[in-house]
């Protein structure tokens, strides 16, 4: 006898196993069945049908009729479904109570956990030159009162760095400061000297020193962008670190101040020819 798969699935959703659903749907078709009969009709293994019938009797969905050969009858569908729904409500209520207790227990643990930070939350590792240039532009845009830089080749951002020019102008209008230290190599580089001149016109203070340990940008004593050249490979490849950490930024600012105090004032402007194709007199929009 074929059973409606939809009805079987509905009974399973109400808490019955598939065998229990098939046996109950078979029992409703006539007054009573023996265990052997219902096993054949419901296509349930004979060795399993007794456990299935016992479970239905315990749930009060099936009635056992004693006799020379025990028979089983289905409880009226309306009553059977009402009992299944009652069991589901009881189960849902238990789950609701358990979830309430669990939420109360976990809430303070979660709250305490919000005070702990993962180092990866404030450290970003950058290897792609485009990503490094993008982060460099971003840290300049975000600066609100101070921008400190160690500038040494190779440069990943455009030499003109119009984003930086706008940032310096904005900082100076707001009463902030922008300072940069370049290496002596830049004294013989027309592009670098032109860049120094343009940034100086925007309001940046600059100095020169023989060597710099690394490229570094510190914004507002809280954000740091620095390069970490490979000390072994000896290539131009580099890894940059972007770190939002006031304590580290404060330490690196002390290092910057030490280098700044020992550095020389930048020389006067060289000839205004700009080899990278942009006239030195061409204005940079604010």
Image: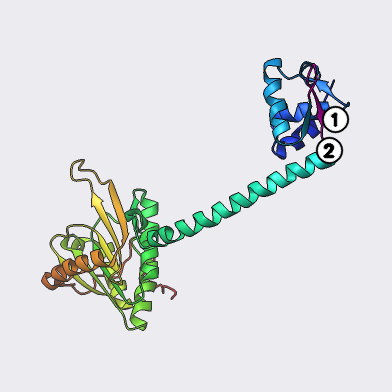
Which residue is situated farthest in the right direction here? 30
Segment tinted magenta in the rendering: 66-75
Q: Residue at x 30, y 53 (%)?
A: 240
Q: Are marks 2 and 1 in contact (CB under 8 Å)?
A: yes
Name the mark on residue 77: 2
Q: How is the image coloured?
A: rainbow
- Residue 284 higher or lower than 235, as above or below: below
Residue 10, quarter of the rendered image: top right
Q: Residue at x 70, y 17 (%)?
A: 45
Which residue is situated farthest in the left direction here? 262
Q: Secondary structure at mark 2?
A: helix
- Residue 37 higher or lower than 17, as above or below: above
**Badge 1 is on which residue?**
28
Q: Position of residue 261 (x, y in %)?
A: 13, 73
| Position of residue 252 in the picture relative to residue 165 (left or right) | left
Residue 78, quarter of the rendered image: top right
- State the separation of the CA atoms marked 2 and 1: 8 Å
- Which quadrant is the C terminus positioned in? bottom left
């Amino acid at each position: 006898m074929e059973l409606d798969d939809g009805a079987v699935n509905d009974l399973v959703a109400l808490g019955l196993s598939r065998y229990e659903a098939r046996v109950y749907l078979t029992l409703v078709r006539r007054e009573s069945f023996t265990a052997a009969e219902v096993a054949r009709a419901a296509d349930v293994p004979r060795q399993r049908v007794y456990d299935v019938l016992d479970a239905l009797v315990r749930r009060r969905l099936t009635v056992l009729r004693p006799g020379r050969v025990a028979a089983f009858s289905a409880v009226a569908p309306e009553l059977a479904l009402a009992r299944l729904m009652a069991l589901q409500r009881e189960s849902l209520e238990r789950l609701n109570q358990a979830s309430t207790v669990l939420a109360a227990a976990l809430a303070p643990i979660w709250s305490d956990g919000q005070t702990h930070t993962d180092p990866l939350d404030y450290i970003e590792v950058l290897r792609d030159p485009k990503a490094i240039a993008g982060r460099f532009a971003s840290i300049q845009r975000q600066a609100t009162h101070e921008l400190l830089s160690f500038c040494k080749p190779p440069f990943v951002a455009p030499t003109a760095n119009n984003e930086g020019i706008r940032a310096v102008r904005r900082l100076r209008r707001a009463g902030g400061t922008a300072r940069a230290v370049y290496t002596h190599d830049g004294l013989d580089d027309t592009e670098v000297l032109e860049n120094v001149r343009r940034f100086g016109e925007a309001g940046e203070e600059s100095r020169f020193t023989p060597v710099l340990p690394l490229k570094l940008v510190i914004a507002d004593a809280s954000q740091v962008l620095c390069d970490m050249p490979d000390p072994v490979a000896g290539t131009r490849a580099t890894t940059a670190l972007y770190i939002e950490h006031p304590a580290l930024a404060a330490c690196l600012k002390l290092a910057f101040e030490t280098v700044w105090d020992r550095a020389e004032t930048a020389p006067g402007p060289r000839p205004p020819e700009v080899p990278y194709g942009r006239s030195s007199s061409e204005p940079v929009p604010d």
